Image (tube, rainbow, N blue to C red):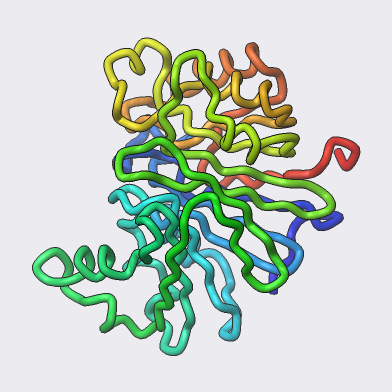
Amino acid sequence: MPASGPAGAPELTFWGVRGSRPVPGPDMLLYGGNTACIEVRLPEGRYVVDAGTGIVNLGRRTLWPDDEPIHLLMTHLHHDHVTGLPFFGPVHHKGREIHVWCGNLGGASAEAALLALLAPPLFPLTLEQMPARFIFHGFHAGETLRIGPDRIRTVALDHPSGATGYRFDTSAGSAAIITDIEHRSGVQDPAVVALCEGVSTLVYDMMFDEAEYGASRGWGHSTAEAAVRLADAAGARQLVGFHHSPNHTDAIMRGREARLVASRPGSRMAREGMSLLCANQHDG
């Protein structure tokens, strides 16, 4: 099974960083145009957060041993987070076990929703016709998932139809993924702050800038300014912007990243293909 980074700290690889829809084109090459998918490697486990179009390249470029089950942790089931699933290479390998975890449906699993989405006339194959074996798990966001030796904390996020944030901890570091969240002006969600407390790396939804957010309230997304406030309140070490707007070209993203770094040194915007070691400060 693939190991995490040096000293056992979590390692994140960003296979898709966009929100809403994929955006191919020459002005989107630096940050990438695929939608949400993050690979998380721990010392004894590997996880995939979301199945946007980025999961296609994850399946093409990463070795998956035949006896390794795949654990797919869904933040929620909007199209930009699930549309890559039927094109993920391992789903076409007979006997492969793919565990799908979903926490925003009141305890129900994602099975009914995905069976409805991946079926004629919307898709030529049903989920049941794919060679892999899907195993569905429903839970309530806020519960701690116990998968093998790993304990993955979760939190409910403010988003239309709900969403789930995840935190991964090892003795050497930690990572929290908080995407598709609507922040409230002047108010921090205490459950989100608690989940992110002291985290080595905080990945946060920075889809809008402040001007765009004014016209996009209720869409379930956030800003770099809100991310900095959360990171400061929680004492997060490193801040990473995620779920980029499909309208933000590389030129726009460069400017947004420069402003983020000026506001909180050491921060960055996620780029497709980027890997990060989420180590405690004393580990470098």
| Residue at the image position 81 percent from the left and 57 percent from the top | 8
| Residue at the image position 73 percent from the left and 46 percent from the top | 174
Quarter of the figure with the C terminus: top right
Left or right of 178, for residue 158: left
User: In the orientation shown, which residue stands out farthest toward the left?
Assistant: 121
| Residue at the image position 30 percent from the left and 30 percent from the top | 219
Quarter of the figure with the N terminus: bottom right
Left or right of 182, for residue 41: right
| Residue at the image position 55 percent from the left and 24 percent from the top | 188
User: In the orientation shown, which residue stands out farthest toward the right?
Assistant: 282
Q: Is residue 223 above or below residue 195?
A: above
| Residue 209: quadrant of the picture | top left
Residue 275 position, x and y percent, is 64, 47
Residue 254 position, x and y percent, is 51, 21
Residue 59 position, x and y percent, is 47, 66
| Residue 41: quadrant of the picture | bottom right
Left or right of 189, for residue 196: right
